[in-house]
Image: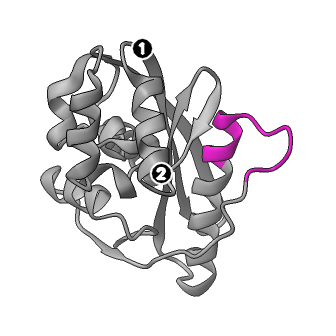
Amino acid sequence: MLILASASPRRAELLRAAGIEFTVRVADIDETLIDGETPYEYVARLAAGKAEVVAATEPGAVILGADTTVVIDGEIAGKPVDRDDAIRMLHRLSGQWHEVLTGVAVRHRHRLLVEVETTRVKFDLLTPGEIEWYVATGEPMDKAGGYGIQGRASRFIERIEGSYSNVVGLPVHLVWRLLNLLAAG
């Protein structure tokens, strides 16, 4: 049985939609960025850390850890801390390309496989009114980068290059590939 080391409802929805059976065990880890750490290293470390924390209490289980972040001009854009922060993030995204990185870690016994998926996303040029409207919906507040591609912000996404499910929060194809590599030994 697969254990998802995440409380994210979006990750759970993506796994269910792909027909992958799992249970959930939330992993509580320190998500503070380490000085000099790149966004790629950051999401890989957090994904592995989540898998390791749950593995410590679930010996023998297959554990899936993941962490997603939005990167704008090389800088990590986490979840907005307040309304003004969400507005600032959306202004930075407006008319620009950015990257969504998800670290994926699968662990079983002594084996740990970790990879990072990158998807590029292009926002349309947003008017101040569109930004105000979107922030007023409340949707940006619990999402890395201040938006959810699967929700109301979908109307602002001009183009993506890469995995759509990665932008939602879990690159399902990568998860499936890593699970198969783990099973193959």
Magenta-colored span? 33-44
Is 77 left, or right, of 178 in this rendering? right
Q: Residue at x 59, y 48 (%)?
A: 113
Q: Residue at x 38, y 51 (%)?
A: 143
From this view, report whether residue 1 is shown above or below residue 146: below
Query: 59 left or right of 30?
Result: left
Please report the residue visible at 64 percent of the width from the left and 24 percent of the height from the top.
74
Query: Mark 1 belongs to which amino acid?
Result: Gln
Residue appearing at x 48%, y 51% in the figure:
80
Q: Which quadrant is home to the N terminus?
A: bottom left
Q: Is residue 137 visible?
A: yes
Q: Position of residue 167 (x, y in %)?
A: 34, 36
- 158 vs 14: above or below: above
N-terminal-most mark, 2 or 1: 2
Asked which secondary structure carries label 2, the reply is loop
Q: Where in the figure is residue 64, as x and y percent of width and height?
A: 46, 61
Would you name the residue on which mark 2 appears?
80
User: Is residue 42 one of those drawn in magenta?
Assistant: yes
Using the image as rendered, state which of residue 38 and residue 179 is in the foreground.
Answer: 38
Q: Position of residue 133 (x, y in %)?
A: 20, 41
Q: Which mark is residue 116?
A: none
Q: Quadrant of residue 155?
A: top left
**Cα distance in 3D space between marks 2 and 1:** 18 Å
